[in-house]
Image: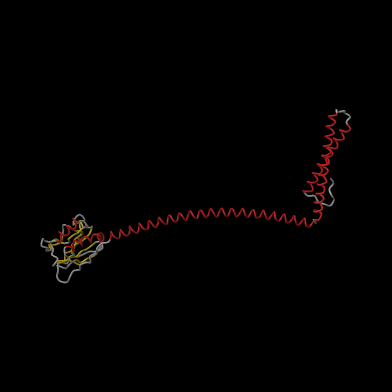
């Protein structure tokens, strides 16, 4: 089948051309077979000839059917050609451009969809990570709150354990009273002087103090760490301190208590024993470098 001049080929036209050529070849072969049968000089028996006549009739029918199909295909091709001929070159170019644009737009949309899917997947992962961290933070917050509650309870218990009943210092009252000088150092109690059983002063206490030096101004002494009475909160220590004060009478004596820095914590134990025995006292906090001088007399103890 010849192609019309001036009409560009497309896929439909090529398909129809191929089909028509195929049918034309089939018809040609069928005609060739019929001609060969007619010119063959072989004599056949009547039955064979009858079969050949029948086959020839069938072939003729098939040929007519194929010719009709060819006519229909040519008619359809003619219609398609007329439709194609009505399209100008500009329309075809515009349709091609539109197709290419739509194809490019489709590719772009697919790429955007792919990017959006990746972003959605990443967002889901981030949301899951945020949810996991929030769960961890809530767990840590609960733990911290529990620890804070425990610490507050522990602090309250410690405060309660450390809470003590404070007794105000009993200051020496007016009037003439004998001053009994005691030194609290090394967490031990030292009486600076020796006293008789009835409370009279009998000089320096050489038993509990060590002589460091001696000059024209006097004798420099220091408590002996291995002597004196232990100042503790035990009942035994309290009893010993109360017994040591029994030779004095609160009515005519008061205590001058020198406390060194290493025994500030022990002072309260002796104070409790002194107040329980009814004594007034004068508290003299002292540093480790402070020196005290005994000038003699009842109230001659000075710093």
Camera sees residue 68: yes
The residue closer to the viewer here, 142 or 35, is 35
The residue closer to the viewer here, 11 or 129, is 11
Q: Left or right: 109 with respect to 56? A: left
Camera sees residue 29: no
- Display coloring: secondary structure
Q: Position of residue 25 (x, y in %)?
A: 82, 40
Q: Position of residue 42 (x, y in %)?
A: 87, 28
The residue closer to the viewer here, 64 or 280, is 64
Q: Quadrant of the N terminus?
A: top right
Q: Residue furthest left?
A: 198
The residue closer to the viewer here, 118 or 278, is 118
Q: Which residue is pictured at 82% across the width and 49% down the height?
A: 75
Is residue 107 depicted above or below 199 in this figure? above
Q: Left or right: 90 with respect to 285? A: right
Q: Quadrant of the C terminus?
A: bottom left
Figure quadrant of residue 287: bottom left
Query: How many numbered circles does the render carry?
Result: 0
Q: Position of residue 11 (x, y in %)?
A: 77, 48
Q: Which residue is pictured at 82% across the width and 44% down the height?
A: 68
Q: Position of residue 87 (x, y in %)?
A: 80, 56
Is residue 114 depicted above or below 268 in this figure? above
Figure quadrant of residue 248: bottom left
Q: Which residue is pictured at 70% across the width and 55% down the height?
A: 102
């Amino acid at each position: 089948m010849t192609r019309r001049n001036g009409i560009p080929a497309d896929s439909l036209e090529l398909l129809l051309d191929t089909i028509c050529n195929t049918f034309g070849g089939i018809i040609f072969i069928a005609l060739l077979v019929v001609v060969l049968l007619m010119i063959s000089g072989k004599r056949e028996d009547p039955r064979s000839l009858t079969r050949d006549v029948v086959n020839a009739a069938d072939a003729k029918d098939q040929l007519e059917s194929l010719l009709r199909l060819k006519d229909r295909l040519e008619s359809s091709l003619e219609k398609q050609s007329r439709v194609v001929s009505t399209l100008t070159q500009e329309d075809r170019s515009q349709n091609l451009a539109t197709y290419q644009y739509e194809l490019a737009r489709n590719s772009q949309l697919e790429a955007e969809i792919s990017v959006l899917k990746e972003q959605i997947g990443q967002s889901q992962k981030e949301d899951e990570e945020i949810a996991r961290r929030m769960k961890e933070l809530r767990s840590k917050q609960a733990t911290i709150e529990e620890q804070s509650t425990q610490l507050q309870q522990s602090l309250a218990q410690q405060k309660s354990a450390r809470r003590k009943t404070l007794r105000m210092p009993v200051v020496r009252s007016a009037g003439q009273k004998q001053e009994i000088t005691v030194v609290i150092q090394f967490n031990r109690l030292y009486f600076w002087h020796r006293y008789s059983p009835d409370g009279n002063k009998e000089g320096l206490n050489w038993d509990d103090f060590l002589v460091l030096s001696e000059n024209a101004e006097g004798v420099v002494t220091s408590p002996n760490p291995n002597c004196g009475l232990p100042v503790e909160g035990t009942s035994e220590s309290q009893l010993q301190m109360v017994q040591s004060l029994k030779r004095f009478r609160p009515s005519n004596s008061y205590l001058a208590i020198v406390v060194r820095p290493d025994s500030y914590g022990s002072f309260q134990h002796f104070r409790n024993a002194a107040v329980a025995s009814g004594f007034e006292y004068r508290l003299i906090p002292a540093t480790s470098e402070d020196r005290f001088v005994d000038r003699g007399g009842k109230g001659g103890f000075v710093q």
